[in-house]
Every structure is written in structure tokens, then in C-alpha cells.
Image: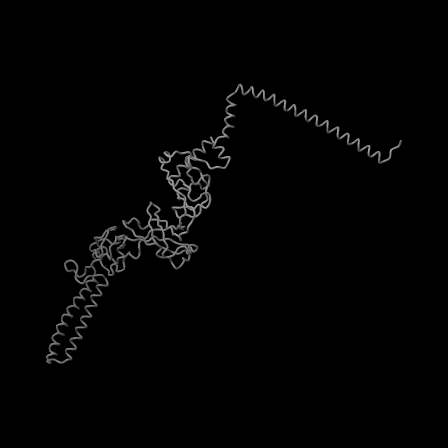
């Protein structure tokens, strides 16, 4: 019987479905056999592996030990993200000198550091000049010698001084004569013996003589020469004297040397106070003001001093675009010597922060700031983020709470122990 097209299509579809189903069953059977063989092979290998372990027990032990390390407290702590602990007993902590402090709130004064230099206090430094030409007859002052106010630095012989002293002596003689004449004429006039005109002339002559004496004295005072002569009554000799207590810091005069009136032959400075000078860029001028507290630290030693900004230049340098600033420092014992390089730290206004630790407590481990926090069995490494600092305390913005006890002094010992532990673990 002939089939229609629809019947033939249905038969073909049934045949195709049957073929696909048979192929699937055949493929699944082979896969299961392969899996079973593999499992059987693995079991056989397990037997062989067991025999090998029986012969080479040391290898088995090593591998077992490696797997066991993963279950140690340190490994578990690392796996769980807990901080590493450096085990130390209280006796070991005391022996190492590790000081423990408590993180707490504090007022910090951030600072800006400027390089500077110690210089003479120009307000207490004098350049001694002869003010008249002459020749050095004696030079008792030596370089670096402490001197008192009025102490003789050098003796100068000068014709100018001789002339001025002679002028003073002559004026004094004329004044004495005019005074005597005035007294006589006054008496005669009072007794009606001489005319009033003679009395008036005598009085005028006396006043002129007094002016001449005063003028001669002022000339000698202007050059620092005394009215009387020098040793042995020498009119040409005068002494260069120290203007105040200080130290001879420069000397440019030798015995017998001719000097000009404007030559700076000595420099005397009072070293009981000095200047710490530094320069301030335009962007930092708003942080450096007269009266701001500063700390000055020596670059060559541990010497430091507190002070205040005493001067900030009103003009910026044309080339450098910086302003000069200075701090006036007391200098007991001349600890601050001119020429010494220093660091000037200008302190800002105090700011209250919630958590601070000692600056020495913060260590760098693998490029990260850490603090060693005290725990029952030693110290735990605690990563932190830091903020402002005043050189003594550091703000902790993250990683530590107020009240936490930490290693403040000699924390570098713990950093060293941590490095040893890391090296041993890698080995």
C-alpha cells in the first residue's frame, strides 16, 4: 500500500531519533568503562604508592610534616588575616628595654622645617674703626679674646688727634682768661667804676670762649679720644676701646701698621645672643609670622632651643622670590656658633587629634607603617595609617584605637625580631 508524503516524513523522523538514541547509549557505556578503568588504575597506583612509602618512610614524613604546618597557630593566624605575634615574656621585654605606652588623644602642633644658619646678632655686633688716620703703636687685643666694655683694643698715634687736643687746650686757656676778665669787669661795673659796655664785652668774650671749648671737646668725643694725652702726656695718642662686652671675632690690625680713618680694624660681637636666619618661599609666608613659636635644631649635634620668629622680610628677593626670616636665640655657653647649619621648625596652631602614639613607635615593615601592640603573649604587628606629627607624637588615623598599649621605646628591636622570623619562615 502506497504511503503518503506525511507518513513517509513521520517514519524518517522516527528512524533518525532511534539512531541518535542508540549512539548515545553506546557512547555512555564506553565512558563508564573508561572511568572504571581509570579508577582501577588509580587504586593500583595507590598500592604501588603505598609500597613506595613503605620503603621510603622519610619522604612520607616530610610531606606529612609540610601538610601539618598548615595547621599550626601561626599558619592559621596568617590564613585568617590575624596579625603576626612576636612572642616575648615580660622578663624579655624588660631586659630589652622596650617601653610600653598607651595610645591617647593629644594636641599636635604640625611644623614646617626650613634650613638655616646661625649668624651674629647684628644688633650686638660692632665694627671698630679709628675714625682718624694714624699708626698702630700697640695692639693688645687678640682674635677670639673676650673683652669688656671700654677695654683697650689698640693704641693709635695720629696727628689729627694731636691737633684737636691742642685746639682744646688753647680754647681752655682762652676761656680761663675770658672768665677772669669777665669777673673783673663785672666787679668794676657793679662799683660804678667802669662802663656797662666794658662789662657786656667781657661777658660776650667769655661766652665765645666757652663755645670754643665745647666745640673742641665734641671733636675729640666724635673720634673717641680722651681730652688728656696718652701715656707720658703724648697728645697724638688715643685708644680704640671695646664698645660693649663681647668677643673679638675679627682683627685686621698689626703693630706699626698705618690705618685709614674708615678702616674696620676690629669686629666685636656679643655672643650672648645670636640669630638663626632662614629663607621662606612665597607659598610658606602665611605659615611664618613674627611671634610664631619655633624649634631650632643643630645639624651637627643634638643641641636644640625654643624661640620665636623675630623678623620676616617685607620684600621678596628678585631672583630667589624668597623672604628672609630670623629667630633671636639666647646663647648661654656660646653653644650656638655663627656659621653652624641648623633646621628651623616653625610650629603651627595646636590641633586636637583622637589617637596619637610616640613617633619612635612607628616602624616601616615592607613599605607599610606598623605599630607593635602589646598582647598577652608578646607583641602583635598592627598596620596603621598616620597623619600629622610634631616630631614627638604621630597621629594615627586608622588601625589603632585610643587606649591600646603599644611598644613606644626601642620598638626597633621588635622590628628586628620580626625580620628574623620572616627570614626563618622563608628558609
Residue 138 position within the rendered picture, expressed as x and y whole percent measured from the top left: 20, 54
Q: Quadrant of the N terminus?
A: top right
Q: Examine the image and state in which quarter residue 374 appears.
A: top left
Residue 140 position within the rendered picture, expressed as x and y whole percent measured from the top left: 21, 53
How many numbered markers are drawn? 0
Q: Examine the image and state in which quarter residue 179 appears.
A: bottom left
The residue drawn where x is 22% and y is 59% is 134
How are the residues colored?
one colour
Residue 347 position within the rendered picture, expressed as x and y whole percent measured from the top left: 38, 52
Query: Left or right of 351: which side holds 179?
Result: left
Residue 79 position within the rendered picture, expressed as x and y whole percent measured from the top left: 51, 35
Camera-nearest residue between 14 and 340: 14
Q: Residue furthest right?
A: 1
Q: Examine the image and state in which quarter residue 5 appears.
A: top right
Query: Left or right of 327: which side holds 227?
Result: left
The residue drawn where x is 36% and y is 36% is 94
The residue drawn where x is 38% and y is 58% is 313
The residue drawn where x is 46% and y is 36% is 84
Camera-nearest residue between 132 and 52: 52
Compared with 272, 44 (above or below) is above
Amino acid at each position: 500500500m502506497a504511503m503518503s508524503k506525511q507518513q513517509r516524513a513521520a517514519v524518517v523522523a522516527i528512524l533518525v531519533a532511534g539512531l541518535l538514541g542508540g549512539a548515545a547509549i553506546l557512547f555512555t557505556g564506553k565512558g563508564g568503562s573508561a572511568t572504571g578503568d581509570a579508577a582501577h588504575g588509580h587504586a593500583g597506583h595507590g598500592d604501588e604508592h603505598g609500597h613506595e612509602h613503605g620503603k621510603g618512610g622519610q619522604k612520607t614524613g616530610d610531606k606529612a610534616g609540610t601538610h601539618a604546618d598548615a595547621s599550626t597557630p601561626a599558619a592559621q593566624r596568617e590564613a585568617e588575616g590575624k596579625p603576626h605575634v612576636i612572642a616575648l615574656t615580660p622578663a624579655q621585654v624588660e631586659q630589652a628595654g622596650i617601653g610600653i605606652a598607651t595610645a591617647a588623644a593629644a594636641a599636635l602642633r604640625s611644623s614646617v622645617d626650613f634650613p638655616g644658619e646661625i649668624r651674629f646678632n647684628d644688633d650686638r655686633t660692632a665694627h671698630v674703626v679709628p675714625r682718624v688716620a694714624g699708626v698702630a703703636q700697640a695692639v693688645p687685643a687678640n682674635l677670639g679674646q673676650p673683652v669688656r666694655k671700654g677695654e683697650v683694643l689698640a693704641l693709635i698715634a695720629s696727628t689729627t688727634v694731636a691737633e684737636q687736643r691742642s685746639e682744646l687746650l688753647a680754647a681752655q686757656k682762652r676761656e680761663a682768661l675770658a672768665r677772669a676778665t669777665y669777673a673783673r669787669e663785672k666787679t668794676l661795673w657793679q662799683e660804678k667804676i667802669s662802663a656797662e659796655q666794658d662789662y657786656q664785652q667781657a661777658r660776650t668774650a667769655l661766652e665765645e670762649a666757652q663755645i670754643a671749648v665745647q666745640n673742641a671737646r665734641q671733636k675729640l668725643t666724635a673720634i673717641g679720644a680722651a681730652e688728656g694725652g696718652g701715656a707720658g702726656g703724648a697728645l697724638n695718642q688715643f685708644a680704640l676701646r671695646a664698645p660693649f662686652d663681647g668677643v673679638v671675632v675679627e682683627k685686621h690690625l698689626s703693630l706699626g701698621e698705618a690705618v685709614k680713618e674708615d678702616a674696620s680694624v676690629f669686629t666685636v660681637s656679643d655672643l650672648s645672643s645670636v640669630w638663626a636666619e632662614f629663607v621662606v618661599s612665597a607659598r610658606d609666608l602665611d605659615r611664618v609670622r613674627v611671634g610664631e613659636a619655633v624649634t631650632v635644631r643643630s645639624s651637627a649635634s643634638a643641641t636644640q632651643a625654643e624661640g620665636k620668629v623675630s623678623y620676616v622680610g617685607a620684600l621678596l628677593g628678585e631672583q630667589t622670590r624668597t623672604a628672609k626670616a630670623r629667630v633671636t636665640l639666647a646663647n648661654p655657653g656660646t653653644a650656638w656658633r655663627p656659621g653652624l647649619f641648623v633646621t628651623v621648625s616653625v610650629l603651627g596652631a595646636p590641633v586636637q587629634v583622637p589617637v596619637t602614639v610616640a613617633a619612635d613607635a612607628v616602624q616601616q615593615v615592607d613599605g607599610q607603617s606598623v605599630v607593635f601592640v602589646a598582647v598577652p603573649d608578646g607583641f602583635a604587628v598592627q598596620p596603621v595609617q598616620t597623619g600629622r606629627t610634631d616630631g614627638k607624637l604621630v597621629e594615627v588615623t586608622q588601625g589603632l584605637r585610643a587606649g591600646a598599649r603599644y611598644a613606644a621605646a626601642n620598638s626597633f628591636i621588635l622590628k628586628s625580631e620580626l625580620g628574623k622570623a620572616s627570614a626563618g619562615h622563608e628558609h
